Amino acid sequence: MTEFDDADARSLDEVDNLTQDELAAVNEADHKVLPVTYSGTDFDVEGLVRRLNRADIAIPSFGHGDPTLEAAGFQRGFVWRRPQMDRFIESLLLGFPIPGIILVQQQDKRYLVLDGQQRLRTLAAFYSGVHAGIEFALQNVADEYKGLTYKTLPAPLRRQLDNTFIQATIVKTDGTGESLEAVYQVFERLNSGGTQLTPHEIRIALYPGEMVDFISGLNKLPEWRNLYGKVSPRVRDQELILRIIALFMSADEYERPLKTFLNDFLGKHRHLEDVDVEQIQTLFEQAAALLNSAAGRSAIRYQSNQVNAALAEALFVGLMKRIQAGSNLSPRAVRSIVDSLSNNKRMTAAISGSTASEENIKTRLNLASSAFRRTR
């Protein structure tokens, strides 16, 4: 690599690539497929931007329920980098064909963006002339377009852009749970090519609400951030927290696939039903503090610089149960347990290979819980 170092490359991978486990989860067949009603229409680019600016087309906030929207919460943050944005605008100026967008029409006739938010946000930014607080002038394009903003486009190019039609598929919903579930199934099936959604991004789409906000808050705790490292732009850190909470509360209900278990747990506790928020936060924070004091970042990593989610969930669940029982452990004792588990052949097998199997999850949780429970 010549333009950026390994750390930058890992950062880009974090944004662009799904892990093998994530790909398998996203591509897993639906247990029940629901029908949708849809129609097609074309919008000119200028009209799309105008509708965006007056909120007749809305991009729901990622992971948070909005009571005024019937299908809120299914969009991730803006992830396109400037070269992608510039090339998209250039394609329109050149008259190249581009993919259509998919919108959800709700009962008040507003359109919600189901697929295409990166393109629409790019258009809105280019027309406004500002992106990320700086002037949006084309850079990563052919020489004849470099430096152009929407305001400085020659009249023929401006007309070319304004009058370009983008095909839209309009999915209808009546606001019922069944129709929204059908919309979300469409969303999952659109998850291919480009920057694919991670399973947790899709999960947040399915079940936005107070539990998602609670997990987002835990994700900001200093002790957790010290352990995990940089905030994941693909919310993998938040997914790990969900795994810890779900297995702490409901490990006896676990059945493969992990994706379905987490979806069901989040759906059941979407608005923090039957969740002792104060207790969970206290146990999670204390466990993170102990692991930090005992072993630091290496506590939740195994033979790699990458976080091992299977190891992390086992350590957290076992330690949280020990703390819940009202028995304190010293950082020295915790370090001894972490080292012992890392060298345990059964634990090694349970955090490698098929980590989502019922047997491996049961094995690693039992090993960690027993180790923390026995130590005095």
Image (cartoon, rainbow, N blue to C red):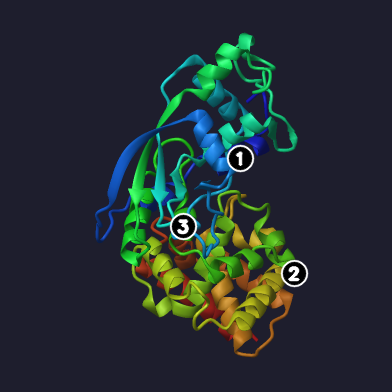
The amino acid pointed to by label 2 is Ser
The picture quadrant where one finds residue 154 is top right
Residue 14 x %, y %: 57, 44
Residue highlighted by disc 1: 10
Q: Amino acid at mark 3?
A: Ala
Helix, strand or loop at mark 1 = helix
Depth order, front residue of 372/76: 76
Label ID, residue 262: none
Residue 10 found in image quarter: top right
Residue count near mark 2 (Cα–Cα under 10 Å), binned few <14, some 14–19, many ≥20: some
- The structure residue drawn at horizontal position 55% and vertical position 61%, both measured from the top left corner, is 64
Q: Nearer the viewer, mark 2 or mark 3?
A: 3
Between marks 1 and 2, how big is the CA–CA gap?
27 Å
Asked whether the viewer can see residue 128, the reply is yes
> Mark 3 = which residue?
205
Q: Where in the figure is residue 7, as x and y percent of width and height?
A: 67, 39
Residue at screen point 25% across, 57% down: 34
Q: Position of residue 127 (x, y in %)?
A: 62, 30
* Up/down of 201 relative to 166, above or below: below
Front disc: 1 or 2: 1
Front-most of residues 142 and 277: 142
Secondary structure type for disc 2:
helix
> For the residues marked 1 and 3, what is the alpha-carbon distance in whole angstroms?
26 Å
Considering only order in the chain, which callout, 3 or 2, is on the residue closer to the N terminus? 3
Q: Which residue is mark 2?
A: 293
| Residue at x 51% of width, y 62% of height | 68
Amino acid found under the numbered disc labelled 1: Arg
